[in-house]
Image (spheres, rainbow, N blue to C red):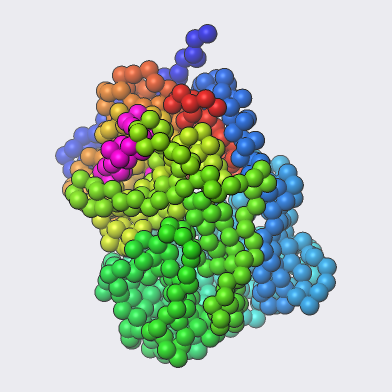
Amino acid sequence: MTDPTPPVAAIRPHRFTVHGRTIEDPYAWLKDPNYPEVNDPDVLAYLAAENAYFEAMMAPHRPLVDTLYEEMKGRIKEDERSVPQKDGDWLYWTAFETGGQYRQWWRKPVLGGADELLLDEPALAEGHEYFRLGAFSVSNDGRYLAYAIDDSGAERFEVRVKDLETGEHLPEVIPGMLSEIVWTADDAGFLYGLANDQWRTDNVRFHRLGTPVAEDIEIFHEDDEGFRVGVAETSSRKWIVIATSDHVTSELYLLPAHEPLSTPILVSARREGREYDVDEHDGTLFIHTNDTDPNFRLCTALVEEPGAWTELIPPSPHFYMTGVECYQDYFVVEGREDGLDRIAIHRYEDPTLGRSIDFPEASYAAGLGDNPEYDMPVLRLGYESMVTPGTVYDYDVATGEKTVLKVQEIPSGYDASRYATERLKIAARDGTEIPVSIVYPAGFPRDGSAPLFLYAYGAYGYAIPPGFSTGRLSLLDRGFAYAIAHIRGGDDLGQQWYLDGKLEKRQNTFDDFVDVAKGLVADGWTSAGRIAIAGRSAGGELMGAVVNSDPELWGAVIADVPFVDVLNTMLDDTLPLTPGEWPEWGNPIEDADAFDRIRGYSPYDNVRAQAYPPLFISGGLNDPRVTYWEPAKWAARLRATKTDDTVLLLKTNMGAGHGGKSGRFESLREAAEEHAFVLWQMGIAG
């Protein structure tokens, strides 16, 4: 039986010139001119043809997909329930019903009483191909719930308000919201932000309960199209925080929670390259900032003089301070010490001395959990490692005692002794040592014969934690090692690690990934062609760059919603994210050097006539972050240019966005498809 014939996208000559450089873009037509509406018949026909080809090619492997799916599903406790947490007079938790795709949200009185169903996600999701709950905020007095839903994947949320005493919804509905929801102190209304036509939140608005949405008052507006506006509250709930920022610069304002219509108080005017955030305790602001050092420091200021900062905890070359939270009797400093999570408790009476919370393993991920109250004598923590399932602790701040409340249950069984984990360091070509977290089955051979799965992200200062994954076990149990490369571009080793992988240093990110792979080969973990790799979004850009540069290393490639048409996207300032992305990638409209640099690595622009490894590419029709045409154009150019007959699949979710299909089981099935593709292409029996 012969394989189905892959679709061929039409070539329609299109060129443009910027800074005297002419770009040929024969697949530009795949961007529907009516976007965000996609109704061009040629575009839809091509996406449908690719989806049909995907289904036909995967059809013989559906038994393997089903096997993997059942394995993954068997490791999930179907009637999963979170640990209840007190907030005011109530205990709150979430729970899944057996077979349920989505959560239910529950509470009950602290002093005793019946369980109360606050929100039933399965009922809200019924009849929709996609469903996602966004903001979820209960009023301070516990009477009202304001929540936001997205039923298309386009991330344009609709706000609804439920009276929890009557169970009825209020008549007002707010469409097009893209923010958190913060209630005022008197619960008369809440603050939120609307997305504008370019899907950018440039405002904060106040909605008073019982009034028409059209009468909502704009409290704050941002004029810089590169900045996004958010709303939050301090731990004490005395202050509402309005934050406006891009990827490198922030500016914050305070509003008294009891006077939301007063003039916002500027903490400190924006200064390019300076980021800061604030919390408050007893009239003192605690300001976490990178103004003097990329590893951040902690300052204080009086609310009456918010711009007069005094250093409290200086920056450290070994400790990257990632955040500070204030509580009634202490404050918590979170960060990473030499790349590993650290949580330290500081007392106000002696604030420079912190007591770190100890964790048992050499490589792990840990952080604060849900701690909603200001007076928290016991902190909720989360902990996991590549071999330790997710664990929820209560930490007694007075005694330092940790109490295990819950360990992630794996119904089909899990024996940690069957696996081992290490933290490696592999030198990149410039001599920089790149951390690598790796987990592998006991008895794993170090003779280069075994397969290895390598994952990375490497952008926006986002670190990939060495956490636990039940889905990963399906690969480990088939002889794979699984590695996470903590490459530059993330902030795994501090903000400088991030800075060393962006803008003019972007090539470091791609080189680090390739050099980690070569180092793993040199150390006998695997061999060239036996490495499966994966990345999502900006991590998909990474996949596109390394298949262009070093195609012979990879045995299979998963590129989910990949940001691969980088040059065209950064040249289009009408797209939702583009102005806000220029600090990350550069502005090729105004800067010829940025144009040349992006053009030099943009995966779509650098497809060449050579053999490529097998590729599984995904996209989402409603994705506002990486628009559907990026993976579609890339797949089309690869098909027309590559010199081999290896498999290339493009799957476009026609009813979803950036995160793929919603629902815990649907997302598992997508993971099973990708794992099946890897096993098929690498010749490993299912």
| Residue 7 appearing in the image | yes
Q: Position of residue 13 (x, y in %)?
A: 30, 25
Instruction: Please name the residue shown 72% across and 77% down the image.
Output: 89
Q: Position of residue 115 (x, y in %)?
A: 80, 65
Residue range corresponding to the magenta coloring: 511-539
Q: Along the line of sight, which residue is nearer the eye, 157 or 661?
A: 661
Q: Is residue 512 magenta?
A: yes
Q: Along the line of sight, which residue is nearer the eye, 254 or 94?
A: 94
Q: Along the line of sight, which residue is nearer the eye, 577 or 488?
A: 488
The residue furthest top is 1
* Quarter of the figure with residue 23: top left
Give the quadrant of the C terminus: top right
Horizontal arrangement in the rendering, residue 63 relative to residue 91 (left or right): left
The residue furthest right is 114
Instruction: Please name the residue shown 46% across and 88% down the image.
Output: 348
Q: Position of residue 635 (x, y in %)?
A: 40, 28
The residue furthest left is 20
Q: Where 39 falls versus 55 (above or below)?
A: below
| Residue 654 appearing in the image | no
Q: Position of residue 507 (x, y in %)?
A: 24, 46
Q: Is residue 419 magenta?
A: no
Q: Along the line of sight, which residue is nearer the eye, 61 or 203?
A: 61
Instruction: Please name the residue shown 31% across and 19% down the image.
Output: 643
Instruction: Please name the residue shown 50% across and 39% down the image.
Output: 476
Q: How many marks?
A: 0
Horizontal arrangement in the rendering, residue 134 relative to residue 243 (left or right): right
Q: Where 183 falls versus 391 (above or below)?
A: below
* Quarter of the figure with residue 321: bottom left
